[in-house]
Image: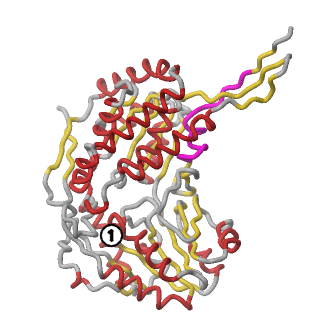
Amino acid sequence: MSRILQCISPVDGSVFAEREVFSREQASAAVMRAQSSQEEWARRSLSERIDLVRRGVARIGEMNDEIVPELAMMMGRPVRYGGEFGGVSERAGYMANIAEEALKPIVVEDSEAFERRILREPHGVVLVVAPWNYPYMTAINTVAPALIAGNAVLLKHATQTLLVGERMTRAFVEAGIPEDIFQNLFLDHETTLELIAAGSFGFINFTGSVGGGKAIERAAAGTFTGAGLELGGKDPGYVMEDAHLDAAVETLIDGAMFNSGQCCCGIERIYVTASLYDAFVEKAVAIVSGYKLGNPLEEATTLGPMAHRRFADEVRAQCSEAIEQGARPMIDPGLFPQDDGGTYLMPQIITGVTHQMRVMRDETFGPLVGIMKVESDDEAIALMNDSAFGLTASLWTGDVSRAAAIGARLDTGTVFMNRADYLDPGLCWTGCKDTGRGGALSVIGYQNLTRPKSYHLKKVI
């Protein structure tokens, strides 16, 4: 009996979309088509591949008027924010711009006697397992450079954003990329892991839970398949005494609450120097109290529902546990009568928190942030490092040297100064500890999506 994947809309609980799961035979056939077509794709010129990827991205942009309300229905982001095409275009465009330089041969010697060089070879077939929270931007991080580098790409998207993979592959195929080179697969977990265990892919990129990343590593054990894993975060912000207070509050609170807190590098805990703490909390409460929770299809809505009831339940559990242990909620529930105990969840700021509380240790992934007072850089660094995760950290100060010195002591993938919750395609997107391993975007992204191949050519016998 075939299985059906269903996207249940967080907006109204309806079945927004459903698709039949591929059988193992259908999935294997898709892999074989990709494998048999990839070499011809890699033989095309780099400039042609770049041009076709640019056209595919542009085609996504042409669909934006349909995509924005579709995303609102699938995962709850308000239409007022206009979707993800800006980020998709920025990231794919940057990777297209640097491709020639990033993939050019490294020439060690070119003399009358020898030619020695290192070339970058595509892995073959790349599997991209993409999440629902930023379904286009997270996917394009790997899809665009993988195709440009000469790989075929198979995309398995999250059930919560069931239609995204279809739209992406349709856009790229309509732009001229062969349909076997970029395919969308509707897979269950079992078939996905079976394909990985069979060594079907040259590289795997996964964005999701720590448990999902561990399952992929177990399935790939012994296949020597490379993997890039972004598995979660508990990203901190630290506000120092010389920070621009208004900018710090506005940026960090937006980083904590945007997309209903469902951001990979969203701010989940904030540490504020004692002299600014009271003012910071007061300003933060004022901002959050002005949000409008509601139907994401309405332009006035600034905070939509969470993507699924179980995600909202976890946020509520962390918040209530912290309050029971002595934390203080700062946002009046009366301001958010739309909170229905289901997917519609009011935002909350809590103070009086400690690292004995789950809310300051476990990934929250919702519109809830704890704020702590600190007395020194050393205390802030110790608290920021007191986490199983390491994706980004946001430092607020006017002193670049101080920020760099603190950053050198942090266990994190990215150090921000005076900004937060942003992915710079010129820098490597990476993490440490339970956040995972590998690196996307930048020149390093191309290095991970290719393998080195050395040529040692002796011209004189």
Residue 311 in percent (x, y) is at: 30, 62
Pick the front one: 433 or 261: 261
The span picked out in magenta is 438-455
Find out whether residue 135 is within the magenta segment: no
Q: Is residue 61 above or below residue 371?
A: above
Tell which of 257 and 432 is nearer to you. Answer: 257
Q: Residue at the location (86% across, 16% down)?
A: 113
The residue type indicated by label 1 comes to Val
Which quadrant is the N terminus positioned in? top left
* Other residues around mark 1 within 10 Å, as few (<14) / some (14–19) / many (≥20): many
How far from the left and from the top, in percent, is residue 101? 63, 37
Identify whether 132 is placed above or below 377: above
- Identify the residue position indicated by label 1 in the image: 315
- The residue that appears at 80% across and 23% down in the rendered structure is 110
Q: Is 172 located above or below residue 359 in the figure?
A: above
| Residue at 57%, 81% in the rendered image | 243
Q: Quarter-wise, where is residue 130 in the image?
A: top left
Expressed as whole percent of the image width and height from the top left, the position of residue 460 reads 85, 10
Report helix, strand or loop for mark 1: helix
Query: Residue 185: x, y in percent?
Result: 32, 34
Quarter of the figure with residue 37: top left
**Which quadrant would the C terminus be assigned to in this image?**
top right
Judged left or right of residue 133, residue 409 is: right
- Whether residue 449 appears in magenta in the rendering, the answer is yes
What residue appears at the point 55 percent right and 61 percent down from the top-left corner? 390
Q: Nearer the viewer, residue 247 or 77?
A: 247
